Amino acid sequence: MESTGRGRTAAVVVLLLASFMDLMDSTIVNVALPSIEHSLHTTAAQLEWVVSGYVLTFAAMLITGGRLGDMLGRRTVFIAGTAGFTLASLWAGIAGSGTELVVVRLAQGVFAGAMVPQVLGTVQALYAPRERAGVYGIAGAVTGLAAVAGPLLGGAFVSGDVLGLGWRAIFLVNVPVGVLVVVGALALIPQTKSDHPLSPDVLGTVLAAGGVVALVYPLIEGRQAGWPWWTAALFVLAPVLLAVFVVHERGRARRGRALLLPLRLFTDRGFSAGLIVQLSFQAGVIGFLFVLSITVQSGFGFSAWQAGLVVLPFSIAAAMTSGAAAALVAKAGRTLVGIGALLQAIGAGWSIAVVAGGSDPTVAGLIGPMAVAGAGLGLVLVPLTDVVLAAVPVGDAGSASGTLSTFQQAGGALGIAIVGTVFFDSAASGHDLGGAFGVAAWVVVALGLLAALAGFLLPRVRPAAAAPSVTA
């Protein structure tokens, strides 16, 4: 189904507003973590779950959410997901305990996973292939704007104590936006479905998500609990569940059923290398931003607004290099990914000298390392998707894209679990927060180097234009 005129333009505005809301929600929370900890008396593990729980359930729902839209109608699922996301945001804004906030964030991720896949799915249904590049360009700009706006708005809300709400405003701001999106969707977005929808693989989703949760849960909760026996049991259970998932997917393949993740793609070295890059790079980036925000506020007395300013060079540099990368990807896609991952590692290493070097860090002193790390992000995200998808058979492009997006979110959850655990364990072992950040940031450096090495295993191809990621 393709349409013309003002109607579809208005529909795209509504879709991108929802995308902006989700992306901003992903970046706005970090600067509020110390305030949340002080207000709700949360544990370190609960702080990790506030961020990682959202991306974990988001990752689990992405592919299934896309298929539900194909089956039930993208407009229907988009409205349901947006309404649920909005209600969860309201609940998060009035949460009375750390446990309650974690539960709500888990729900919020599920609804976001239903909402977000419908954005590009609807764009593809409304626009002919030759017309999509312009819409994708606008979507990329929205991504960049959300990345910049999130930390700044979060810092302004918390430091300015807007309407006396403090950190609660970072969630409550979604409520009027979400209501506007739902009303706009009801009035402006046409119903679209796939002519050949793939049925959701519910058991596969449960097995895959269970395997990741069995890995992440003990990493986050184990340190605080003293690493009891169940942490080891869950570490053993994680690969078992993932192995059962592989057996399940092979069985579905033999029966001709739709797969959650086409296992044949994993036999391709380039695709597997792309997943390693995605997982390790995102783990490093998200884990780095998580511990940095806590360190500068709780360790060095930065306000939430100053913490937001610290992230600003990162976001601006990422936006600038992503534009350059889009122009160069056809000539040097694999090289750009490798260089970008190295820059992320260099930026993290430089930040160790600034934060853990013995003198108190400043916003100005962090401009350099944050800009370098952000430049690395921009050089990785756009080329990675294009290079990996260009080497995948056309019939598997949709599944491959969904897998990349899922690994992106799962990497974020793992990053918070791994880097956050190292950080809090170092702090509990006697390091001041600056020293604990230094230890954790070396893990980020290692993850960046791993991503760089895997990046040079990517295929040498000339990728065509691809849809941008709306889940970055």
Image (cartoon, rainbow, N blue to C red):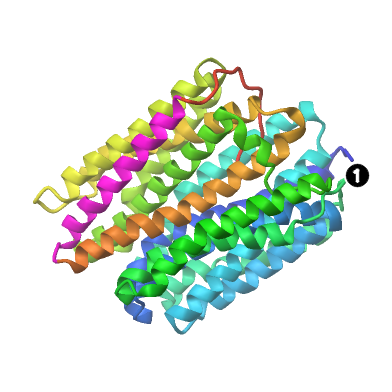
Q: Residue furthest left?
A: 358
Q: Quadrant of residue 254?
A: top right
What is the chief secondary structure element of the magenta stretch? Answer: helix
Q: Residue at x 52, y 69 (%)?
A: 171
From the image, tell me which residue sits under label 1: 195
- At horizontal 66% and vertical 41% (from top left) the residue drawn is 263
Relative depth, front residue between 117 and 63: 63
Q: Magenta stretch containing residue 442, yes or no?
A: yes
Say which residue appears at 51% left-offset and 36% top-offset: 381
Would residue 177 be seen by someone viewing this image from the given angle?
Answer: no
- Magenta residues (range): 430-456
Residue 465 position, x and y percent, is 66, 26
Indicate whether 70 appears above or below 392. below
Q: Is residue 284 magenta?
A: no
Q: Is residue 380 left or right of residue 247?
A: left
**Dividing the image into 4 quarters, which one contains the N terminus?**
top right
- What count of labels does the image hold? 1
Q: Secondary structure at mark 1?
A: loop
Image location of residue 111, percent across then percent down: 66, 64
Q: Is residue 358 above or below residue 220?
A: above
Residue ID at (54%, 67%): 173
The residue furthest top is 331
User: In this image, 265 relative to 460: left or right?
Assistant: right
Residue 266 position, x and y percent, is 61, 37
